[in-house]
Image (spheres, grey):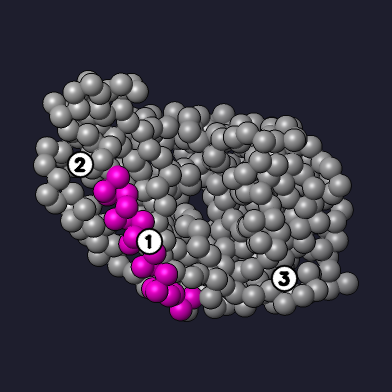
Amino acid sequence: MSDYEKLDAWVDAHFAEEVEFLRELVRVPTDTPPGDNAPHAERTAELLAAFGLHAEKHPVPSSEVHARGLESITNLIVRRRFGAGPTVALNAHGDVVPPGDGWTHDPYGGQIVDGALYGRAAAVSKSDYATYAFALRALESLGATLAGSVELHFTYDEEFGGELGPGWLLAKGLTQPDLLIAAGFSYQVVTAHNGCLQMEVSVLGVMAHAAIPSSGVDALQGAVRILNALYRRNEAYRSIVSQVPGITHPYLNVGRIEGGTNTNVVPGKVSFRLDRRMIPEEDPVQVEAEIRGVIDEATAGFGGITVQVRRLLLARALRPDPGNRTLVLALRRHAEAVFGEPIPESGTPLYTDVRLYGAHGVPAAIYGAGPRTVLESNAKRADEHLLLEDLRRATKVVARTLFDLLG
């Protein structure tokens, strides 16, 4: 039996244990907001300890957490040193958006139906807590002479940008890996992703009674001018095409609007939040300047209003990196062998924490448990789920890849 076959056999023999591990992780809510995620880290560390994996606990100071509008964060690092050589980190995030409406399964139940495990974060990305922990355990089971180290990074700030997750661990010097595999969400090996600029725009006018609207300044009319201008600009983005497969063009979304005080009152303030996705070829500084310019132009000549623009998030794109070739080729080769079909390399329109590692010079690839496409998993929608067979196969691929990198 080859070493790859031994790894596969170990995963198969311990797969029921892996599934139960994931079910336990799904059962501890990590809705963000509110972002009270330290209890999940504690439970994860407890479960890992039962496997002989010691998780270092790195709590982020509450002042930093509260300043970001969250409640608690404890990031985890598991370190396994086999010998002199490169350090390969495996990162997945435990925080997730709230479940929302429309579920037909308990979002925290970890229910298994027709070979799929249902629950919030079952696919993105508590699944890869299981993938990576059990791939590491499989690697250890060989008892082989290996050159290098493996680290598991389980973090809790992806939904708010990752700065208090991987960004915090890297900034504090708690880790500096040589290579990174980050939580996946589809069969593809992902090597590039979009950036994201999020901004809050507040339009200030003057409240007035609706019976005498001329005594006020309607902030909503000013906001409508801005929104119309932004949506016109969004149409123009279709002509800006990325050269990275899997990524199309930039786009803009207004995801939240609030304002006014009552039906019979001219609104004195209207605020909205926008999300501008940036393709890898774009310069974030120029993109932000462009958005601000569109806003200024739209409100020029509209007297009596004041516009305040605040940046909420700037997540830079992940660009293709030739330094990850060995990692990418290993992942694709083993995924094709395990899945029995070609596994492409591509970009994704999402943005992830991987960019933070990239900013520290760490070559990376995104790969883990997931369906053929993100849409199939219902990630961030009702009835999010993961096919258990995809979890099994992804674990084998990652274990084989680690063996190649350190063997």
Estimate the x, y position of residue 270 in percent, counting from the top left: 29, 35
- The answer to whether the residues at label 3 and label 1 have Cβ atoms under 8 Å apart is no
Tell me the kind of residue under disc 1. Asn
Residue that carries the numbered disc 2 in the rendered image? 308
Task: Looking at the picture, tell me which residue is in the foreground, 172 or 210.
Answer: 210
Q: Badge 1 local density, few (<14 within 10 Å), some, or many (20+)? A: some
Point out the stretch of residues depicted in magenta: 224-244
Tell me the kind of residue under disc 3. Ala
Residue that carries the numbered disc 1 in the rendered image? 234
Tell me the kind of residue under disc 2. Gln
Q: Secondary structure at mark 2?
A: strand
Q: Secondary structure at mark 3?
A: helix
Labels 3, 2: front one? 2
Name the mark on residue 164: none
**Residue located at (50% from left, 62% from top):** 349
Secondary structure mostly taken by the magenta-highlighted segment of the chain: helix
